[in-house]
Amino acid sequence: MDPLFIALIGFIVMMVLILLHVPIGVSMALVGVVGFAQIVGWEPALTLMGSEPASAMASLDLAVIPLFMLMGSLAAASGLASDVYNLAYALIGHRRGGIATTTIVASGGFGAICGSGVATTATFGRVAMPEMLSRGYRSDLAAGAVAAGGTLGIIVPPSGIMILYAVLTEQSLLDLFAAGVVPAIMAIAFYIIAIRIKLLFDPEAGPAGEKTSLAEKIKALKQAWGALVLFTVVMGGIYSGIFTVNEAAAIGVVVAFLFALLRRKLGWQNFMKVLAEASAGTAMIYVMVFGATIFSYFMAVTGAAAFLVTAITSLPIPPEAIIFTLLILYIFLGAFFDEVAAMVITLPLVVPLIQSFGYDLVWWGIINVVVIGIGMLAPPIGINVMVLHSMYKSLPLRTIYRGILPFLCAEFVRLTLLTLFPEITLWLPRMLH
Amino acid sequence: ADTLRFSSFEPPVALVTKEILTPWAKDVSAASNGALNVQIFAGGSLGRDPAQQLQLVEQGVADIAWVIPGYSPGRFQEGTVAEIPFLVPDATAGSAAMWEMYEKGLFKGDFNKLKMLGVFASFPNFVAATKPVSTPADMNGLNFRAPGPTLLTAIKALGAVPIGGITGPSIADSISKGLIAGTLTQWGAVETFRMADVITHYNTVPLGATPMLVVMNKSKYDSLPKEAQEALDKFSGAAFSERFGAIFDKSMKDTRERIAANPAVTIVDPDDKLMAEWQNAVSVAKTNWIEQNPEGQQIYDAFAAAIAANKSSQ
Amino acid sequence: MKSMEARLRAASHTLALLGFVGLLGLSIMISLDVLLRWLAGMPLQGVNDVSAVVMAVVISACIPANLAMKQNISVEVAGAMLGGGTKRALDTFASLVTLVFIVLMAWQFVPYTMNLHANGDRTWVLAWPVWPWWAVASAMIIFAAVVQFLVFVADFAALIRGDADRFDSGPEGRDPHL
Ligand code: NA
Ligand code: NA
């Protein structure tokens, strides 16, 4: 049988398995092994089920994922998120829509010490949502700000998605984090603008908070020192070149652990909960990496990636058009598929294509993060919306989605700008070199 | 035509894969009159882990692979003779001598379990650091990375602290963070792994080459038609060593010129007196190697003689 | 049957927790290394050696709990649209396929570890033998296969009996966004 035909069948079978509820990593691994066997033989193909998981498990590059997960969980457990929120409130809460803006800024700040979008959403669902509702915020604006703020967990480095992408495409994680900084600042700014615009149409949606005195501001600042120290140590250490990323993550774990202990936030029960949370997320990512690696070897050995690149690049279409088609495809796939899964599944085919156009893979990684962020908000299954809905069952999904609309528009504007002008993304990592 | 899968963990644009392995694969395919199609799977597309390349061939995932034996300690033990400091002067003499040793049956063990297409030695590794390192004493107390476990001996002998587990792509990062003060390496790797931005001091004292192999699955080779085997044989062995050595050394020369053009960079080429000082400081690496290997003295002498013969024939 | 599954689930949970206690220990060691490098200019030897082998055990320790709690990323639109019985059938099918996956993995980890033993693979700097760590990892994967077998049996029983949703970890439980 023609290897290309085997590749096509493999891809289809994998999609079918995924639609039949089989976990994505499992589908990719099994189809990868069976497909590989058709070309290379069963014995070598089966060894992939040992060697590939083993090299992923011992990889020091991937080790950053569990470390950042643990750091984020410990930071949330020790109440650092509330501190960041209170500080942001003291500074900007008194303006119209101030608490919504506070939520965005605080989510961004917390995103700088937590790599997960869902954890950020859940954290501020607890911290910020009751504040807004009790001060007469319209529930759609409140929910929209929390859910959109949640995406900053992955948009602001450190970001679990960036780590996953860096490992799967063998890009420098440091470059990816650096590339994420300017787009992250843009995201926060655009979200704030989205709130202002929403208030133009609907001034009663977000009343102003009380003004805080200077003394209260200083108090909030003092209280937030824990978060500031963690942020400075981890991100400052990475960008200033004092630690490697692995070291920064490990030190972050220790610092967050010490805070949790010192603040007596870490009872035995709570400690167990934090560990369980971080370990569950970790195993999930590793299973996906096992599958993605094995599947990518299958795609390589069939020559499908090379074939696709030749076929597409020989079309009389400019690369920009193909890039935008890909983005639309991802967002469309995201309607019934998970965006992270869509990224992982298509990487072995898309990465060679992006490279053949001469684009930087670091840039493409950031674009992927934006698309995944949109997927976290967009109907029918925006995971952030689901998380919020599960916390506030009385809040109808329709209301949350209505609240998200302005933020979603902001994200589309940002995606377009970042796609058209790669320099915005690549400027900082180049400067650091 | 039989398709042979040739695995390289290096990206397709890196020196050995682009300039040596890919043209070799093309030449073999062309010479086989359509009996063979040697396909390069670069960038680890059949297996990302450099340490796993040997297993890829043994398990039949790939038919041919470029293997750095240093990643599988103990497997190609005799071949590590090339890692002894002050033996290999360049890749041309080193690779020719390596093949001669293999052909004469002096390399045993795992060398016989696989079909050897090429047995090479790299350009010798030397000192690349962020601080001036002119005499052996300058190495004392510095954290140093070795490109393979066996080069650790030389580092320890110099009183430096060996740091392991730093892969190529993270060397530059580790140097700029002060995790290591430098590494033993050669010019090509300095560029490939972007060390040129962070390293300021080089000392070209030859502290041992890196053995490299191109191996093929034996039963796969035996299963091929005669025409295909002949095409492989034609470009393998001594001819492959010659190709490897010439291109490797040429690239070393070009790369060195590019790096030396940077005014911030100092390159020390030690004179005879300084060379003797270094040789004395690391002599324990040689004595240890001879002691720790059965027939160590015999292999050492034969390799030194082969190097001398190939040096003078240039 | 039910209590057996519950007990194994508890055991998986404990394993994962132990794994992450190990990760905490590793973080402390790395931090110490950085501190010593900074303050005393004398780093610990072989930190990367230890990290690689400990990570293998940490990650493998998380896998049984991951399977017991069904926390792998999957797309469950079909079940949600088609409802009760079909959803249970799909879940049972997915459990079976996952069982095949983890059994293959367990099966291949044994020769992988034996190979490391036979070749005498050691870590670079400290020259620790590598295989004992992988033997522990293999044991965890084999345990994960047992756990998954019971998950499949329980799913199958629920399918036959027509139970209501056996297990729902909620949106956070299946967070693919790290
Ligand atoms: Na983040
Ligand atoms: Na979505």
Image (spheres, coloured by chain):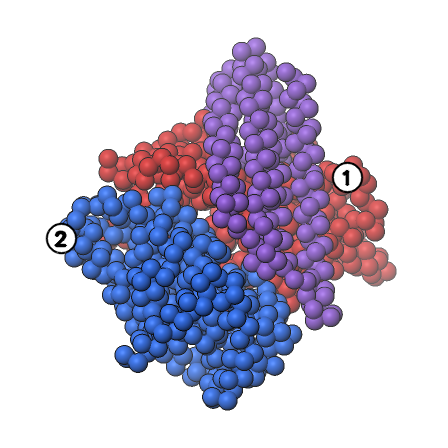
The amino acid marked with disc number 1 is Asn
Q: Which residue is rendered at x = 74% and y = 55% of the image?
A: A255
Taking A395 as reference, is A297 left or right? left
- Tag 2: residue type? Asn
Q: Quadrant of residue A188?
A: bottom right
Give the letter of the blue chain: B
In the rendered image, what is the letter of the chain coloured purple?
C
Callout 1: chain: A
For the point 44% across and 37% down, the residue is A29
- Location of the C terminus of chain B by quadrant is bottom left
Element assignment for label 1: helix
Query: Residue sitting at 55 percent across and 23 percent down?
Result: C149
Q: Position of residue B108 (x, y in %)?
A: 38, 56
Which residue has dot 1 on it? Answer: A270
The residue to which callout 2 is attached is B33
Confirm whether residue A415 shows in the render: no
The image quadrant that residue A280 belongs to is top right
Letter of the chain shown red in the rendering:
A
Chain to which mark 2 belongs: B
Residue toward you, A297 or B244: B244
Label placed on residue B313: none
